[in-house]
Amino acid sequence: MNTRLFVLVSSKQQLLTRVDSNFYKSISPMRKNTLTFALSIFLGISVSSSYAQSWEHTDADRKVAVEVDTLKKKGYTLIWINKDKEFSAETKQQLIDTYFINYPKLAKKFNKKTRKEVTFVIDPEYDGVAATAGGIVRYSPNWLKKNPHDIDVVTHEVMHIVQAYPNGSGPWWITEGIADYIRFKYGVANEAGNWRLPEFNEKQKYTDSYRITARFFNWIEHNKKKNFVKKLDLAMRNKTYSDSFWANETGKTIDELWAEYALNPAI
């Protein structure tokens, strides 16, 4: 997905599936830092990283924060921790607004048991874009300064919280494909952020994840099975997903679906 690596740290198996030597050599330094950080926190291994901090706790963040706030609305809470004194007040409000618009909506539709309290950390030491672990989303202020309209990074990340997939739930590309599909469907500022699903080309694969997989899911929703993504999300969370899921829901295997999609990808 261009320069982005959104890491869902909810499954060791999913994360390890993503890491092979060829992939690691091919990615940008920013992605390497993000992936290294996720591995260090999630797998409990000792690695060197410029931001090797505790991911699932915010005690250290609070000690150096320039701003800590607790915001509540209609049963949902957002803990705001800002470590960047120059962070835009306008961007802050947009991130907060997007959380309160979309998180309750996604929780209601996909997972009513999801947590009711989420933490946002604006972290200058984090040089990715955004990443989620548990109920904590860490954002790069540098990215948001350069891309102030990329507000629906919130929508993608909070969907990861809603997903809450357990270990061994299924392939990582499904996780990220669903999150980008949700951004496409529920995003509040995709157009302003110059974010859209890509046109199909023959070099793509359904395992490419992110927007490429999201577009495939959207095609299935329009042409094969309404509410397909909701059922796929539930299967992942319940650990009932298997390769037979596609045929059970649509009458065709995933490879057959992709072949048909490739012949007529119009939505």
Image (tube, rainbow, N blue to C red):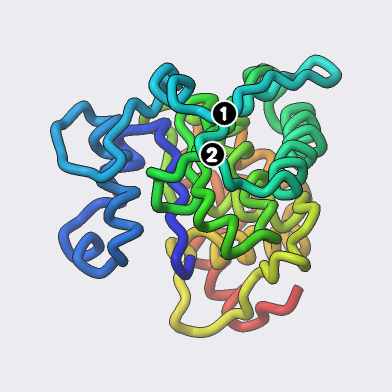
Disc 1: CA contacts within 10 A as few (<14), some (14-19) or many (>=20): many
Residue at position x 60%, y 23% from top? Answer: 68
Identify the residue at image location x=60%, y=28%. 67
For marks 2 and 1, the one nearer the N-term is 1
Residue 217 is left or right of residue 205, and the answer is right
Q: Is residue 127 visible?
A: yes
x%, y% of residue 135? 54, 25
Q: Mark 1 falls on what kind of element?
A: strand
Counting from the top left corner in percent of width and height, residue 237 is at: 54, 29
Circles 2 and 1: CB atoms closer than 8 Å = yes
Specify the label residue 122 is tagged with: 2
Q: Nearer the viewer, residue 170 or 17?
A: 17
Q: Residue at x 45, y 70 (%)?
A: 205
The label shown at residue 81 is 1
Q: Identify residue type, mark 1.
A: Ile
Please state which amino acid type lies under the numbered disc 2.
Answer: Ile
